[in-house]
Amino acid sequence: MKKRVISMLLATLMVGGALAGCSKGNAGGGATASEDGGSASDGKVKEFTAFFSVPHAEINDDNEIQQIIAEKTGAKVKETWLTGQTAEEAVGTLIAGGEYPDFVDAGDGSVQMYEAGALVALDDYLDSGNYPNIKEFFTDQEWDSLRQSDGKIYWIPQFSNIYGEERVCAHNDEAFWIQTRVLEEAGYPKVETMDEYFDLIEGYYEKHPTMEDGTPIIPYTILCEDWRYFCLENAPQFLDGYPNDGSVIVDTNTMKIVDYNTTETAVKYFKKLNEEYKKGIVDKESFTQTYDEYIAKLSTGCVLGMIDQWWDFAYTAGDALKAAGLDKKGCQYVPLPITIEKGMKNQWHNSGGIVHTSSGLAITTSCKDVEGALKFVDDLLSQEIMDLRFWGVKDVDYQVGDDGMYSKTQEMRDNDADTAYKASHKCEYAYFPQWEGTSRDGKNAMKPEQQETEFYDGLSDDLKKCFSAYGVKTYVEMLGTTPAPGPWYPMYTFSQTMTTATPGGTAWRSMEDCKHQYLPKVVMADDFDAGWKEYMDAYNACKPEDFLSEMQTELDRRLAEAAKYEN
């Protein structure tokens, strides 16, 4: 039946042209996808290509919503994702070949692509007035923060940009995660410290060494592959109550850079992991498993806890747990407000958006229709296309009440977790610019997971029971929210752009290599103190002071730049 509904909708579009019946001046502003005549009513759809330097599930070539978006905007994009290479290798291959897709997000390799002359400067296009939705995406100050060494803008960060009122239910960021069944068995205790967290996991594992089907329980696992080794290395900043600056701590009392790798808390954290490893609590395969192997473990429900970013596992392993009915058996994860000591304010979750200045969606010099490519991006930010990307098709993927509020039936939610359905039907254009927050109608959230009633109604009974025990209704409330950090935040958007052209960049690369090599050894060491000393000797030989000095200079620059706009 759904296929028939979609087919009928596509036929209507082809007959009536793009955005039939869509009026200009939609509620709350935001240019629609049809205002400049960029439809496919002549039957021709522009086709672009894109490469994103991250792994991601591909959609089918005949994806239904992608076809609808193509009819409405006059364009579609064939997206390819990272497979079989590291991001660094993939970007290096692109640059060496000199031929590029139309769109690219090279991640940490964005600066290298800029320096190779592979990217198109966007300034003149953005100033033309032809792309109002893109121009609206950032303030003048935020656009200026994206300028490279030649003073021009080459990419558009896609994520964490809030329209209207902030709407947050899921914690999309990093945390200590734990399965609800562990909390339930312990009577839903208040858990504040790392020691309490591991005590819970140990207690559950002692009573339940296997799943119901005999699958061995993995009490705690660590993802360390490639750039995802943040799951191992950056917890000390959070444990000390700081937000995710990623590469350093910013001491807000002194506005000085602090190295979280060498603090007393870092020593306590890695010593704890060492102790848990020796007890058999930490997965012995932690330091050799691939990302796919890690997701496969989480998908079985056998992993009790881990540190990770929500986006790194929830849309793969999280959906797999639902599909297998394991969400009804306490295998879903919730975040806990863990700090190194009781009574400390945690900053696992901060309010406000983030401008990821170090990378974003870029258009390459191989693109033969830059204006058409930008028009497509502009159309994707219109409200109608945003709804299609993230809510789907009305009466197929969501319903609209008499009050104008969007919601889903349980069947619709089940489809959202179905891999085959998503591949054939859903098209989020997930690495193109997108809004968070409130729709231009002033009522609905831009995305279903941010719609408070829809979010809660879609939870499993097990999750609702857990949230009720803690007096909350969302993942964010499990952690608490702190205000947005200062205008410097986050510092990782600078460290990610550093290269070996400077002493600090050289030190940063050496520090990363050192941590990759030694931190697993520290966790597995028979003698922790000896292992830590060996690590610190190697770490200090990387000259971290050069890196910290350049980070301090950048912090001072950002603070001064912000002061100009305030004045």
Image (tube, rainbow, N blue to C red):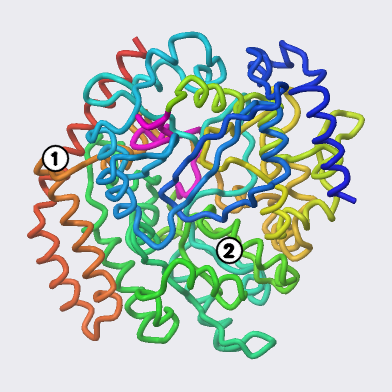
Q: Amino acid at mark 1?
A: Ser
Query: What residue is rendered at 56% in x and 30% in y?
Result: 162
Q: Residue at x 31, y 69 (%)?
A: 270
Kindly report which numbered mark, 2 or 1, lies closer to the viewer in this rendering.
Answer: 1
Q: Indicate whether 490 appears above or below 383.
A: below
Provide residue 256's location: percent of width, then percent of height.
22, 38
Report crowding for label 1: few under 14, some 14 to 19, many 20 or more residues within 10 A (C-alpha).
Answer: some
Q: Position of residue 393 (x, y in %)?
A: 78, 39
Q: Is residue 24 left or right of residue 152?
A: right
In the picture of the structure, the residue carrying the numbered disc 2 is: 190
- The boundaries of the magenta stretch are 346-367
Q: In this view, which residue lies farthest toward the front? A: 43
Q: Secondary structure at mark 2?
A: loop
Classify mark 1: helix, strand or loop.
helix
Residue 484 in sight: no
Would you identify the image quadrant in which residue 500 lies? top left
Residue 392: name its quadrant. Answer: top right
**x and y, in percent, of residue 337 in the image:** 51, 56
- The numbered disc on residue 71 is none
Q: Is residue 512 magenta?
A: no
Q: Which residue is mark 1?
A: 549
Q: Residue at x 69, y 22 (%)?
A: 440
Amino acid type of the residue that numbered disc 2 sits on in the rendered structure: Lys
Query: Is the stretch drawn in magenta largely helix, strand or loop?
Result: loop
